[in-house]
């Protein structure tokens, strides 16, 4: 029975890893559908290459920082419990790789390729696992401190703060330092806007992400015995809440509709295991409105060209999700309890502060040393031709931009 239970857990977590791995295709197609045709190849290549760099950085450095476990030992030591430790690494690595995939959407159409790979290695190898270790690895005394101070540890079941807010706030430094795309704003600062190139691709990306998200959330239990239907239904209702509220706030704009579903899912990650389904629905609905209003404010008022709106979607909705777990997780609101609002508020702010700080530091250093933006001519030609020497539709282009 022990072998059966161990093997079942391995298979369960492996299926979760595969589902979250598939989400990276969703990130890729969401970006490919949003950027112009001349940057679609770059979106696809960038995200899969980031995934490869993330795997190596997390395998050799990041996982050890987060959990104190190294793979630099004999294979016999790695196969205990049917190799559960290995599939757990695979599962958590797909979470880590989501951070540069999130950033990719914000910096699209004008970022240089190789400097971004350097940033990916730093974030996944050092920055992300440090905070991951604080929260999920119970390292560095953070959770003990939170429990002593507020009576409960910081609760982030599936990564509203650890993954999404971290990625969104790291991206903020990048998009500000890169500046806006050429042609997105007039000389007087008024917005012209660059419409998505392919709504079906954008929608496909959202669908893939939504489906994979049930692996992201439900399989965060990391064992068959811990799997919960509550997590599944809370994820579903948050998705629906975010989609419908974004549809209303965004006046049926397809970009807002499809990203609204993702906003709800981002927000529910932290408390999906402790909220009542009605709390998850409200959490998702609020997130949908946050995304629409913040996206418009950032683009129109702050003049920050965050192409896919990753700071509003992941940064702000993730922040809301961390705080919402401390509200709708309370027993007085039909939640399961065991959380503290002050612990959730403090832990969430610590996470976004770490992400925001290192986003500006890492991209600031890269900008000063190797440069992070394509030249004006390269940007005009598009990242596909400038970097990869081929367009998404070479048989139709005949050399035209």
Image: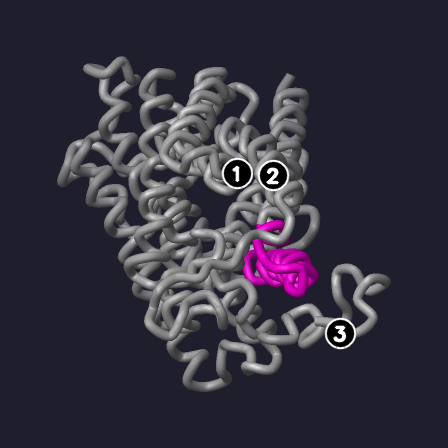
Q: Which of marks 1 and 3 is in front?
A: 1
Q: Distance between the residues labelled 2 and 3?
A: 27 Å
Q: Residues within 10 Å of mark 1 (few under 14, many from 20)?
A: some
**Mark 2 sits on what residue?**
203
Q: Residues within 10 Å of mark 2 (few under 14, many from 20)?
A: many
**Mark 1 sits on what residue?**
254
Q: Distance between the residues labelled 1 and 3?
A: 31 Å
**Mark 3 sits on what residue?**
389
Residue 36 on image: x %, y %: 61, 60
Vertically, is 52 above or below 360? above
Residue 258 on image: x %, y %: 52, 36
Is 323 within the magenta?
no
Q: Is mark 3 on a helix, strand or loop?
A: loop
Mark 2 vs 1: CB contact within 8 A: yes
Residue at 69%, 47% (x, y): give it. 76
Magenta part mainly helix, strand or loop?
helix
């Amino acid at each position: 029975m022990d072998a059966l239970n161990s093997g079942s857990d391995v298979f369960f977590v492996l299926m979760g890893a595969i589902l979250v791995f598939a989400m990276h295709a969703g990130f890729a197609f969401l970006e490919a559908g949003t950027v112009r045709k001349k940057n679609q190849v770059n979106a696809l290549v960038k995200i899969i290459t980031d995934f490869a760099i993330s795997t190596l950085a997390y395998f050799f450095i990041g996982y050890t920082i987060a959990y104190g476990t190294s793979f630099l030992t004999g294979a016999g030591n790695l196969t205990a419990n049917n190799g559960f430790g290995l599939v757990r690494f695979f599962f958590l690595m797909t979470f880590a790789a989501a951070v540069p995939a999130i950033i990719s959407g914000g910096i699209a159409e004008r970022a240089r390729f190789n400097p971004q790979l350097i940033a990916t290695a730093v974030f996944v190898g050092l920055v992300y696992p440090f905070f991951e270790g604080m929260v999920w690895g119970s390292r560095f005394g953070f959770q003990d401190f939170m429990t002593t101070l507020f009576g409960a540890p910081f609760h982030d079941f599936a990564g509203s703060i650890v993954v999404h807010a971290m990625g969104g706030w790291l991206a903020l430094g990048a998009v500000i330092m890169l500046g806006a795309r050429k042609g997105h704003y007039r000389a007087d600062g008024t917005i012209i806007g660059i419409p998505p190139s392919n709504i079906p691709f954008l929608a496909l990306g959202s669908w893939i992400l939504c489906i994979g998200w049930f692996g992201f959330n439900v399989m965060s239990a990391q064992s068959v015995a811990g799997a919960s239907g509550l997590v599944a239904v809370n994820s579903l209702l948050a998705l629906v809440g975010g989609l419908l509220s974004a549809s209303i706030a965004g006046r049926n704009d397809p970009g807002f509709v499809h990203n609204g579903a993702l906003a709800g899912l981002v927000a529910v990650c932290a408390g999906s295991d402790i909220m009542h389904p009605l709390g998850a629905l409200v959490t998702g609905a609020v997130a949908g409105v946050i995304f629409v209003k913040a996206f418009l404010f950032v683009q129109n008022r702050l003049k920050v060209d965050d192409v896919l709106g990753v700071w509003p979607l992941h940064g702000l909705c993730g922040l809301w999700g961390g705080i919402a777990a401390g509200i709708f997780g309370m027993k007085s609101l039909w939640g399961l309890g065991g959380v503290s609002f002050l612990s959730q508020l403090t832990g969430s702010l610590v996470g976004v502060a770490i992400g925001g700080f290192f986003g500006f530091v890492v991209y600031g250093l890269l900008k000063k040393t190797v440069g992070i933006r394509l030249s004006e001519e390269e940007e005009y030609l598009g990242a596909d031709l400038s970097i990869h020497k081929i367009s998404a539709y070479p048989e139709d282009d005949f050399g035209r931009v």
